[in-house]
Amino acid sequence: MLPDEDQARAEVVVIIEESDEDTYSWVRAIRAQSKADPAPRCVLVTDDFRAVNPLIAVECGVAAVLPREGLRATRLVQAILAVHSGVAFLPPAMQGELLTELARMRRDVLEPNGLTMSGLGARERDVLRLLAEGMGTDEIAAELSYSERTVKYVLHGLMARYNLHTRAHAVAYAMRAGVV
């Protein structure tokens, strides 16, 4: 428990209540008012797992969901420490639901718009792949049947969007994102 004046600096927030739309509104408000950077992640303790929408919960910053009934202090502390270190602490069934929702989102939203989970479009992926192979702008343009100006435009847009400073930085980003 923190005094009101310290709550805005909390890194992990524990919410103990039934899960519903009000819970998510409350979590969003806590994160919006937070002075912590990044915004605090939340541990939700509830009796009704069926009411927890995993995708909405994760979007709101919920990183752990625990059953209220029979919850021991050691388990709660374990979840808080895991969440603080960046690890999610979700029941296996909820993890499965989350993966199903992500697959649906990829299939129904991202792929029809030429995007992947990394947020990169097909053109950006192609340019980055060839850049990672060591090709220059002229070679990439020839390989993809683009103008050199188009290749530069694609790279500039990508680098500006993700705050990448060099082409090497862009390739490193693509590797971390699993694109290359």
Image: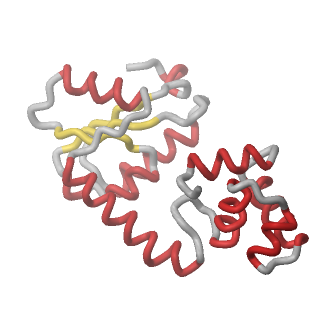
Residue 138, horizontal then vertical, whole percent? 87, 67
Residue at position x 39%, y 63% in the image? 102
Residue 92, horizontal then vertical, whole percent? 20, 49
Residue 136, horizontal then vertical, whole percent? 83, 59
Return the residue found at the far left: 70
Residue at position x 57%, y 34% in the image? 38
Q: Is residue 138 above or below residue 50?
A: below
Residue at position x 54%, y 36% in the image? 39
Residue 66, horizontal then vertical, whole percent? 22, 39
Pick whichever, 64 or 7, lies toward us.
64
Return the residue found at the far right: 149
The colour mode here is secondary structure
Horizontally, residue 1 falls left or right of residue 51, namely right
Pick whichever, 51 or 95, lies toward us.
95
Q: Is residue 83 above or below residue 117?
A: above
Pick whichever, 102 or 179, lies toward us.
179
Q: Is residue 59 above or below residue 62?
A: below
- Quadrant of image for the N terminus: top left
- Quadrant of image for the C terminus: bottom right
Q: Is residue 158 above or below residue 114?
A: above
